[in-house]
Image (cartoon, rainbow, N blue to C red):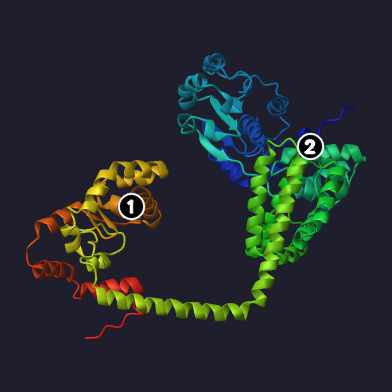
Amino acid sequence: MEHIALYRAWRPQSFSDMVGQQHIIQTLQNAIREQRVSHAYLFSGPRGTGKTSAAKILAKAVNCEHGPAEEPCNTCEACRRITAGAVMDVQEIDAASNRGVEEIRDLREKVKYAPTEVRRKVYIIDEVHMLTTEAFNALLKTLEEPPAHVMFILATTEPHRLPATIISRCQRFDFRRVSLDEQTGRLERICTEEGITAEPEALSYIARLSDGGMRDALSILDQIASFTGGTVSYQQVLDMTGGIASEQFGRLAAALKQGDAGLVLQIVEQFMQEGKSADKCMENLLYYFRDLLMIKMVPDADKLTDRVLNPAEFQEMAGAFSREELFQMIDTLNRYQGEMKYASQPQTLFEVALLKLSGIAQSAGASAQSSAQAGSAADAGEVAKLKQQVAALEKKLERVMQNGVPAGAGREAAKPARTPAPKVASTAKIPQHMDQYVASRSSEAFTAVQRQWPQILQNVKETKVTVHAWLMDGEPVSVWEDNVLVGFKNNIHRETTEKPANKQVIESVLESCLGKPYRLVTMMLRDWSEAVEGVGKPQAEELKLEHEEAGENGKKPWIDEAIQLFGEDLVVIKD
């Protein structure tokens, strides 16, 4: 007698035979019972999860001679002939082979005619995402308003490739991957019916390999049962599928933790001698460390993954690694897995990745040991460092109190974070010693900087073009001692130029062009114009106006500046 593949022999013939899609089965059965069957359905989901099988079962259910029934009887003439594919009114169309507009136009002509053999015409279009744009457009109107005797069932593994206009005209059902327990139970039942002896671990591993697809699981079982003569063991499954037992990965992980590069390379060579591929080993090892991380971070995480057969073993190995180590290892393996696709020697790249992991584990261990030995010394050093910082802050505060606080600084400190500055005369920080800058605006040093400014801009552009873009908004307005004052039209450009990295670039170029070190000082051009226009006016008047503008919260501006610079813990306010 001719052998029929298991996935064909055990293809579901009724809704009760389907595995793992109860949410879809119940909805369809309720629709049949209440006579609310739609004219168009879209079945989407991974391969081997029962989309086409459900479509044929639905076609039998609506056309059953004893129905429409929630379950097809599978004994009447209509059910048996639909199962055999011998009913012309129930057509299964492969869109990958019939994807053109002409085939869809032909279908549109046929749907007009009433069914001749069964109650309702059903068109099952498999892999519907393969249709061309023109074919979709031709199908659109018919799909929206077909004759009352026609039902469309579209099946696809890639629903994102369907036009939204098609999806909106269908009732959509998303088939999910079949869970490990459901697949294992189904495989056990099939083995019992087929007389196949199989170890539970072997069936669990087959289910994990199928990635939630029942058809794939049955194909693997059929292949292994044929090879072993009806007896399926865990080791035979590993040997035939090229899989690697978690115990072997445990040995590899232990060798990585110990930093034993020789043992790591020896284990890899053993994998290769057993016929394992480097890319498959990389993929499985990535999953292994991912499961270790899950078990380490999430309670009862062994229920969240289908790959953990022995949770106790994984718990012990997870305890040997820190979370940071596992993060780094997963990241490293992921990067090398991407490179392996284009590598001419994937085994060598796999070995390099493992040696990298070994280095991560070693450095983490050495760091932990060093930290334990130097704990008390580090504490003492930290205290001394904090004392030095406090002393430096006290000296800095003393200098600020002696030299005075820049005009307008209180206003800047008082502004809330991320709040746009009010449009007043002085929104930006004004440099100290403003009178000296005003008096030096015509000095020889300033004339020299003005003359060299185009060259300075060019050199900044060659050094870092982004800094040049910000600096272009400014222009030199004065030079006093070793300070070059640059006025800006736009406050954002000024603030970006003041960033330490950008400022360092500009000051380096100033030194190279002018022959000696200069410090960059910035302000707004409108503030500079006001300062120049105010030459000769009483200084007290200017200070009074600024103080009133910044003192709306009742505090003196230099107090706010001191608190912002050094923190409330280091500032003592005395009347």
For the residue pair 490 and 419, the one nearer the viewer reads as 490
The residue mark sitting in front, 1 or 2, is 1
**Circle 2 residue:** 219
Provide the secondary structure element on which disc 1 rests.
Answer: helix
Q: Position of residue 413 (x, y in %)?
A: 27, 67
Q: Report crowding for label 2: few under 14, some 14 to 19, many 20 or more residues within 10 A (C-alpha).
A: some
Q: Position of residue 145 (x, y in %)?
A: 46, 25
Provide the secondary structure element on which disc 2 rests.
Answer: helix
Left or right: where 57 falls relative to 493: right
Asked where in the image residue 432 lies, by quadrant, the reply is bottom left
Badge 1 amino acid: Thr
Asked where in the image residue 375 lies, by quadrant, the reply is bottom right
Residue at (66% x, 38% y) in the render: 71
Badge 2 amino acid: Ser
Which label number is shown at residue 89? none
Q: Residue furthest left?
A: 537
* C-beta proximity under 8 Å, tags 1 and 2: no
**Circle 1 residue:** 497
Q: Where 497 falls versus 564 (above or below)?
A: above
From the image, which quarter does the C terminus lie in?
bottom left
* Dot 1 or dot 2, earlier in sequence: 2
Q: Position of residue 518 (x, y in %)?
A: 33, 56
Q: Position of residue 2 (x, y in %)?
A: 87, 27
Residue at (25% x, 44% y) in the render: 451
Residue 449 seen in the figure: yes
Q: Residue furthest bottom?
A: 575
Distance of label 1 from label 2 (alpha carbons): 66 Å
For the residue pair 217 and 534, the one nearer the viewer reads as 534
For the residue pair 473 and 413, the one nearer the viewer reads as 473
Q: Where 551 falls versus 32 (above or below)?
A: below
Residue 181 seen in the figure: no
Q: Where 44 falls versus 131 (above or below)?
A: below
